[in-house]
Image (cartoon, grey):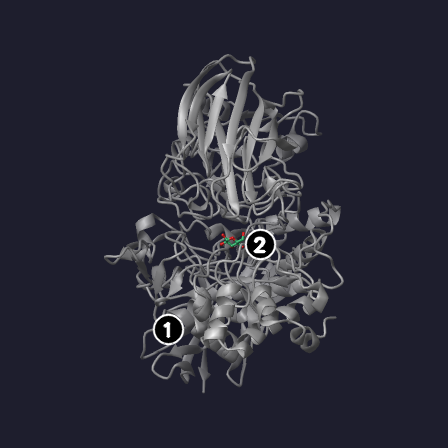
Amino acid sequence: MIDIDAALSALSLTDKCRIVTGKNTWRTVAFPEAGIPAIKMSDGPNGIRGEGHGGGGTPGVVVPAGITLGATWDVELLGEIGSLLGIEARRKGAHVLLGPNVNLHRTPIGGRTFECYSEDPELSGALAASYVQGVQSHDVAVTVKHFVCNDTEIERMSVDVQIDDRSLRELYLRPFERAVKEGGAWGIMSAYNKLNGEHAAQHRGLLTDILRTEWGFDGFVVSDWFGVHEAVSAANAGLNIEMPAPVRVYGKKLEDAVERGDVTEAQVDLLVRDILVLANRVKADERDANVEEESVDEPNERALTRRAATAGTVLLRNDPVAALANSPVLPLDASSLTRVAVLGPNATIDRSMGGGSASLVPLGHRTLLDALTDRIGPDSPTGASVIFEPGVRIDRLTPVVLKSQLRQPNGEPGLRIEYANGRDWNGDIVVVQPAPTSMIRFFGSTPDGVDPRGFSTRISGSFIPDSDGPHVVGIVSTGPFTMAANGATLVEDPLMELPRSEEFFGYGSVEATATLECTAGTPVELDVRWATSEVNGFAALRVGIRSPEPADLMDRAVAAAAAADVAVVMVGTNDEWETEGFDRTTMDLPGRQDELVRRVVAANPRTVVIVNAGSPVTMDWADPSDPGSAAAILTPFFAGQEQAEALTDILLGNADPGGRLPITVPVRLADHPAYLHHRPDHDGEGNGTQRYAEGLFVGYRHYDATDTPVRFPFGHGLSYGDATWGDAVLDAENRSVTVTVPITCTSDRAATVVVQGYVEAVAPGYMRPRLELKAWDKLTVEPGTTVNAVLELDPTAFRRWDTAADDWRLEPGEYDIVLAASANDERQRHRVTIS
Ligand code: BGC
């Protein structure tokens, strides 16, 4: 343990102003002479990426993305997931996990919607608190992020969120409040955006008044990466650590500010003290950040991630089908299958996580086609034939080339990367390493011997085409490059003249493309020279190659569906459509996937549609009044490394789809409440402001209040089992209410039930959304048994923020507790009087 007082007095002012900064992208500065070790941080939040670089990184466990975890509605499970990630963090030598992300699903198209749990603050907060406890039980700190209102990726480093106090308190701050008060979070990450005019990282009202004084937070606050701009306000606000290095704001500038008297040394001591408390909490003096990162694949951890994936997969629809004698399509009876068509672009590629800082190299992953073929294919007891057809393409850019189509000069799969220090790609080679794919990324670290401040590469190998004809080659780069194919220059940007785009967090160029004539099986020699731009801790190159699209791609899929007993069509997005860095511009499925679904359903009514996307998509083919609509629809969102196994478990009825929507699926994009205020407005100087003009009416609160039809309501999800709800018994005491609801399983399969408790003020006399989720209980009820759902509502369930008094207020009066199976499926209501 560090003796905090002794360590503090051993540090000079210069040291103290240095310790509040990063040493590099992921670590803080160590002061061994004062007994202070380095602290290592890692993304987060659906796995531990570690300090990996290039196309790789140390493979790790990938748990379901935040939205899938949100769909579990299972507080206890989140504790188990948090605990697994705490263990993973230790394996990667990390003391701090950069997560969970508890920003709200304010819109269905946020670039990071997949990372966050829900549109509802209580669901988000309860899950986050449990995750935090799980992670921290292994002496690993969390940083609950991004504090606060980082709910869009548009102008993400600068946008000024204009929000009223009541919506801020009741909605956006609430998950943080629960993570701090109930979860005991040791860390918070400030947001990039401004809040009512001040950068979140420099906002004393947030970082000190609310967080520390009101909530009693006694941990540390780290800036989001490059998200702090000015030393005096940040230090006085209570921002403990500026990340990453090189130092831009604290360090010398903070020291000067102390010398000028703009920041007191006592304030700097407070900042440092919290970092030393962190070091003690995570036992950094006993756990060296330099340990080698380990990959561990434990069967019980795989089982947990699979259980979480099934628990968060939502069965949206499972209607009876006339062609099946009015039975539903799911679950499939494996013994009756002889021919199965697996269709759709996502069925053969792992799409189990979104893009950006949350992504990592999975330990292993399987595709739906692999998992289904193993279980029902020719070599299984079922012995069915399994036919795959992609049907459509959905690439946003030219597709990254995978290992199977790349050969290093020595014949091994992949490409060879030769590194030189400095930005001249003809410089002396210092390191040679393979790359598994044609995308390389450097987020803070480089191979040993390669200078992260500036380096260059020569990338060589060959591409093996699998078809004849013109292929489109595309390059997106954060630095200068030139690319030759078979010795002739094909595409280049040696002076970085290409405009920047949204790619690679805004550091990437637009995609430069050229055409390359190929013959199937004849290797094309590639030679790419690439260098970093300036020092910004992030550098990347993406080479994509698109083969000619067969004209009959969709027809083949439709024919396969028609000839099969059952068609499983997996549509969705991927980590390039849903990623940190930008919001989607539409809710529609990319490419011609809607057409594919409609044609497949028309060809075979026994079709299961799997929507594999990290946030809602338009599903016009799911309208129950349309006879041509899909009868069976499942969504796992992005369900982590075991997604394919979990889906197979559900398809074959070996597991119940346990998920309930943590976000409303609107009929169309324009229906969502923030639609009119999603894009920032600008003043003459280009400063963007984003007004949260929908106020309290986020998600179901809006659709309910305005009676707007939705495609699938918040909280919706079906089970394979059936259950009846008995009359609830209420026990109200001291402004707290316990609701007990007996649930009886009436089918011969176990039923998963989530009893949702919404509070409705009977005659509020002030503005209030009609329904607000305040408690829930998730149960599995075995056939023939009755189990009680128990919902606990404490006084926070009835309070509201009183802006005039600048405080919480509990209005005495009558409230209905609405017990429901979704925001649109009320089952019972019970009146209580709160005094
Ligand atoms: C993201 C954070 C992340 C950090 C480090 C930022 O761009 O907003 O969520 O933890 O990078 O990767």
Q: Specify the label residue 45 is tagged with.
A: 2
- Which residue lies at the image location 56% right of the left edge and 28% below the top edge? 458
- Residue nearest the viewer, comparing 6 with 327: 6
Left or right of residue 509, residue 2 in this image: right
Q: Residue at x 32, y 63 (%)?
A: 694
Q: Nearer the viewer, residue 108 or 163?
A: 163
Q: CA distance from mark 2 to mark 1?
A: 28 Å
Residue 705 sits above or below residue 404 on the image: below
x and y, in percent, of residue 470 in the image: 43, 16
Q: Is residue 828 visible?
A: no
Find disc 1 in the rendering and name its residue: 165
Task: Give the residue type that dot 1 points to.
Answer: Asp
Binning the other alpha carbons within 10 Å of mark 2 as few (below 14), some (14 to 19) or many (20 upward) gives many
* Residue 119, horizontal then vertical, whole percent: 44, 59
Quarter of the rendering occupied by the N terminus: bottom right
Toward which corner of the image does residue 260 lie, by quadrant?
bottom left
* Mark 2: secondary structure: loop
Q: Is mark 1 within 8 Å of ligand 1?
A: no
State which tag comes first along the sequence, 2 or 1. Answer: 2
Q: Is residue 14 visible?
A: yes
Residues 552 and 51: in front is 51
How many discs appear? 2
Does residue 569 lie above or below 125 as drawn? above
Describe the element under mark 1 as helix, strand or loop: helix
Q: Label 2 amino acid?
A: Pro
Give x and y (percent) for residue 355.
51, 44
Q: Picture quarter containing residue 199?
A: bottom left
